Amino acid sequence: MFVINPLPPQIDPGLIDLLVKAEPATIGHFLDFGFMDPEIRGLLPDKRIAGTAVTIRFTGVDSTIVHYALGQIRPGDVLVIDRAGDRRHAACGGGVAFAAREAGCRGIVMDGMATDIGELRDYGLPVWARGLSAVTGKRLYQHGDFCVPVSCGGVPVMPGDAILADENGVLVLKPDQIQAAATRAIAMQQDEPVRLKKVAEGAKLPDLNGTNQRIREILAGQAKTP
């Protein structure tokens, strides 16, 4: 059985341009939910992407829906693949990555395996996966879900969610979270070189970030406790 839903509205390009300036690891300093399992790793170094999630799900070997999605994705989309627990059959190889790149896809994030690592490097489309497998999916035309709610790396992903990914990990945000999260993260990133310069000049990091002051306050409170 196939479930085929319409594509979601794309997130405003201005918000995506803002989001891609933020690092997932910086947002991880103040958010805890929305980060995929760290075993889902970027297969290409020094890549950061942001875009609108287009979701698919299939089980086992039948990768028909991946090929359907390649005819639907738009420039600025990120293809998110729920493999429903499969850790054997690769859902993306060189041909899929090349076609996705040519369609304008920003990248592919999957809770499963990829293949053709040499071709992935050559084509340059960022791919996040749990690892590599030489056993590939096949087009059996039996089942697949397109633009449905999925789970990827332990995180629920809705079609139209925002994806931010780099070599540190993958983050899923709702579109209305982008402005606040990205703005805060970018400010923190801009502040870090100033702080590190002070550390290089002899300042202590726990003095600069308030840790020592807070510990003193806690110890003072404990001293007053009978």
Image (spheres, helix red, strand yellow):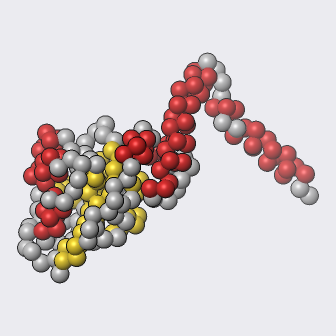
Question: How many badges with numbers are in the image?
Answer: 0
The residue that appears at 13% across and 39% down in the rendered structure is 122
| Residue placed most toward the observer, 130 or 94 | 94
Is residue 213 shown left or right of residue 31?
Answer: right
Place of residue 203 in the rendered image (x, y in percent of width and height, measured from the top left): 66, 24
In percent of width and height, residue 176 lies at: 49, 56
Q: Which residue is more in the foreground, 174 or 113? A: 174
Residue ranking furthest to the top: 201
Measured as percent of width and height from the top left, residue 170 is found at 38, 52
Q: Is the C terminus in the top left, top right, bottom left or bottom right quadrant?
A: bottom right
Give the side of residue 5 with respect to residue 212, left or right.
left
Q: Quadrant of residue 156?
A: bottom left
Residue at 9 percent of width and 74 percent of height: 141
- 152 vs 94: above or below: below
> Which quarter of the rendering shows the N terminus?
bottom left
Q: In this view of the protein, can residue 116 be seen by the observer?
A: no
Identify whether 205 is placed above or below 101. Answer: above
- For the point 28% across and 53% down, the residue is 77
Q: Nearer the viewer, residue 180 or 198?
A: 180
Q: Is residue 225 left or right of residue 84?
A: right
Residue 73: x percent and y percent? Answer: 21, 56
**Residue in view at x 14 percent, y 64 percent:** 68
Q: Residue furthest bottom?
A: 1
Q: Can you see residue 104?
A: yes
